[in-house]
Amino acid sequence: AEAGMCGCMVKIGIIGGSGLDDPDILEGRKEKTVTTPYGPPADVLIEGTINGVQCVLLARHGRKHNIMPTNVPYRANIWALKEAGCTHVLVSSACGSLREDFMRGDLVIPDDIIDRTTQRIETFTDGQPGSPPGVCHLPMSPLFNEPTRQILLAAAKKLSYKAHERGTVVCIEGPRYSSKAESKMFGKWGGDLINMTIVPEVVLAKEASLLYAGVAIATDYDSWREGQEAVDVKQVVETFAANVDKVKNIMKEAVKMISQQNWTEEIQKAKDLVKNNNQALK
Ligand code: ADE
């Protein structure tokens, strides 16, 4: 591993959503095919460096984008990044906006979720042979790693991009989009954004003691807005593509900033949280 300026080791997993699975952001790329106790991840791990800092890129839906949200191997993806020695995971995602002032193309650094998924296993500790022992009941507040979130915000600021400082993401099962009534309800519940992949990814990252935060691009107004066509794939893909360079630049800047801090204490806190919330590990 590479030593950051602080002298502590960091290695940064980057999970690219639709559009940010471009390996060009890494130097000295090397593809690694791996597997995990939870099966193979969505694609190869692409190892390399950004500004001299070790990074691992993984396409959440596979590089051909052929895995639908329900079938993304979330557990294998996170396990593989942990196994690869990552300390941090930075992610990107296209999201619908549930509020007027999160406009199409806006960047948001989310800080909370509302889980509406129904088909996904949200723990590594599932009682199966080969899985971690016991039962894991993790607290979900704070959900994202706050210092890493602050770095993403600082990176956006340094690049003079506007980014909303917080946002609650409603995660639906999909693959269908929401009905108009659902979309309005999610807004009333306090949702700011909507997508199909943040759960269980963020939860599993916490179980793996990885420091996780992400950048969301608001690509559409979902289905709630009067006088606006309901979301479709074309809107999402076009808006994401038009803004993905900003996300790449934020990631690159954030990697640099992460390598300049000492994370020893944060990593220990993340490990203690898992240990202290599983009777089998006490
Ligand atoms: N991803 C991007 N836009 C979305 C929306 N409106 N609903 C769910 N997932 C999305």
Image: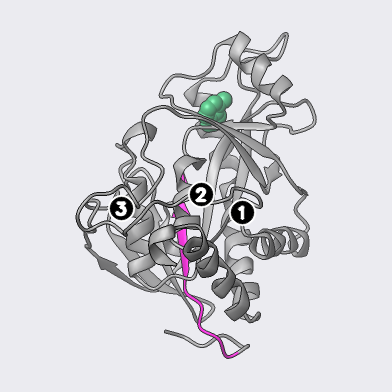
- Residue at 52% x, 63% y is 276
The picture places residue 128, in percent across and down from the top left corner, at 23, 50
Residue that numbered label 1 is attached to: 144
Q: Can residue 18 be seen at all in this image of the molecule?
A: no
Residue that numbered label 3 is attached to: 76
Label 3 amino acid? Ala
Name the quarter showing ligand 1: top right
Q: Identify the mark at residue 202; answer none if there is no mark.
A: 2
Label 2 amino acid? Val
Q: Which residues are magenta?
A: 7-19
Label 1 to label 2: alpha-carbon separation: 7 Å
Q: Badges 1 and 2: C-beta atoms under 8 Å apart?
A: yes
The picture places residue 119, in percent across and down from the top left corner, at 36, 29
Mark 2 Cα shell of 10 Å, populated few (<14), some (14-19), many (≥20): many
Query: In the shown orientation, is residue 87 left or right of residue 225?
Result: left
Q: Can residue 47 be seen at all in this image of the molecule?
A: yes
Q: Quadrant of the C terminus?
A: bottom left
